[in-house]
Amino acid sequence: MSRTLLIIKPDATNRNLIGHVVNRLERAKFKVVEMRMVRLTEEKARKFYAVHEGKPFLNDLVKFMTSGPVVPMVLEKENAVTDLRTCIGATNPANADCGTIRYEIALDIEKNSVHASDSDDNAKIEIGFFFE
Ligand code: CMP
């Protein structure tokens, strides 16, 4: 078993899609082991996306991620990181495979409804960011 972090982003919480996303994840055999609802400060959002420092989309991304509540959760499954990224689909929903969460509900490359860790090492760091 391994663990990863998923965040339901403000575009999805604002459209009342928290239950929908959790249902999709549970049906895909992920176990929710921790979950909370938080409002990110600008400082926290910048820290979380520090890897994107200098990218042209960072300021808008921070504005978006602080615009409403987000729901970070720790998910457990065999091959959790890879399987979750398959399940959510490509960053840009225009390129997301049919049947993925982003294909279904994401609005655009920024308001793409969910974030998932991209490696086991980053999963540990990102889980520690929201949960002790
Ligand atoms: P996420 O998986 O959370 O990782 C970084 C986020 O930046 C990404 O999803 C999008 O919400 C946002 N973003 C906005 N524009 C871009 C872009 N051009 N390339 C990658 N990510 C982008």
Image (cartoon, rainbow, N blue to C red):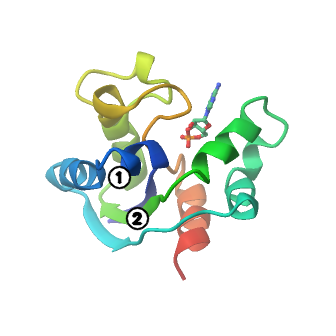
Q: Which residue is drawn at 50% across and 35% down?
A: 111
Residue 7 on image: x %, y %: 46, 55
Mark 1 nearby-residue class (10 Å; few <14, some 14–19, many ≥20): few
Q: Is residue 115 visible?
A: no
Q: Quadrant of the N terminus?
A: bottom left
Q: In this rendering, is residue 54 above or below 9? A: above
> Reading the chain from its start, which is encountered first: label 1 or label 2?
2
Classify mark 2: residues with Cα within 10 Å, few (<14), some (14-19) or many (20+): many
**x, y percentage for residue 41?**
68, 63
* Secondary structure category for the residue under label 1: loop
Where is residue 75? Give x, y as percent.
35, 63
Q: In this view, does 4 lie above or below 90?
A: below
The numbered mark at residue 73 is 2
The image quarter in which residue 90 lies: top left
Identity of the amino acid at label 1? Asn
Residue 124 sits in which quadrant? bottom right
- In the image, residue 94 sits, relative to residue 71, either above or below, namely above
Q: Does residue 16 appear to the left or right of 50 in the view shown? A: left
Q: Name the residue under label 1.
A: 79
Question: Please, which residue is most extreme toward the bottom here?
Answer: 132
Residue nearest the viewer, comparing 6 with 71: 71
Residue 32 image offset from top left, x and y in percent? 29, 67
Q: Residue at x 45, y 62 (%)?
A: 72
Identify the residue at horizontal 42%, vertical 61% (top origin): 71
Quadrant where the image shows the C terminus: bottom right
Mark 2 secondary-structure assignment? strand
Amino acid type, label 2: Met
The alpha-carbon separation of the residues under discs 1 and 2 comes to: 16 Å
